[in-house]
Amino acid sequence: MTNNDIIRSLRYTFDFNDDKMIALFALGGKQVTRAEVSDWLKREEDPEYKGIYDKDLAYFLNGLIMDRRGKKEGVEPVAEKTLSNNLVLRKLKIALDMKDEDILEVLASMNVNISKHELSAFFRKPTQKQFRLLKDQILRYFLRGLQKKYRED
């Protein structure tokens, strides 16, 4: 799953317009233009398509967290240089103020049933023995489940 797929999915799920997208990037600490956002949202077949880097997606997700949860006192969050599916899921969990049960419910709405133990393995540090890499398919189902939950139509 590409970073562009993730940002397109989130834009659709929460019905963000270009101004809102630009504002979320700014909240996360990166100034972007409408043209950049537009190129990131295009499909791969489009000649003007541009891939969004991990760091830029991290700025967007940090901005989403600040928009939904408010700015945290103290140090500004730093955008990670590399993002994994596990980190994307963690940031979405924080932004949407979800508990493990909420994530399991969203996945269950897409007929994906995993245990609470499997879910907790996605949030562990990569150095821990119980850590498990989140596969693209589960993240894709999670994003589709969010669409089902947050879109009225």
Image: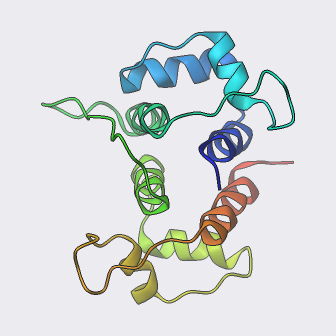
Instruction: Say which residue appears at 83% left-offset and 24% top-offset.
Output: 47
Residue closer to the observer: 93 or 34: 34
Is 128 located above or below residue 148 in the figure? below
Instruction: Say which residue appears at 30% left-offset and 86% top-offset.
Output: 130
Residue that protrudes farthest toward the left in the picture = 74
Please state if 5 lies on the left or on the right of 114 as rendered. Answer: right
Quadrant assignment, res 84: bottom left
Query: How far across and down, in percent of the image, does residue 71 sit?
Result: 29, 30
Instruction: Say which residue appears at 68% left-offset and 18% top-offset.
Output: 18
Q: How is the image coloured?
A: rainbow
Q: How many marks?
A: 0
Query: How far across and down, in percent of the image, does residue 109 sit?
Result: 71, 74
Is 113 located above or below residue 43 in the figure? below
- Image quadrant where one finds the N terminus: bottom right
On the question of residue 58 being in view, the answer is yes
Query: How far across and down, in percent of the image, does residue 11 sit?
Result: 68, 36
Please state if 70 lies on the left or on the right of 74 as rendered. Answer: right
On the question of residue 17 being in view, the answer is no
Residue closer to the observer: 67 or 4: 4
Instruction: Say which residue appears at 63% left-offset and 74% top-offset.
Output: 107
Please state if 136 lies on the left or on the right of 109 as rendered. Answer: left
Residue that protrudes farthest toward the front in the picture = 47
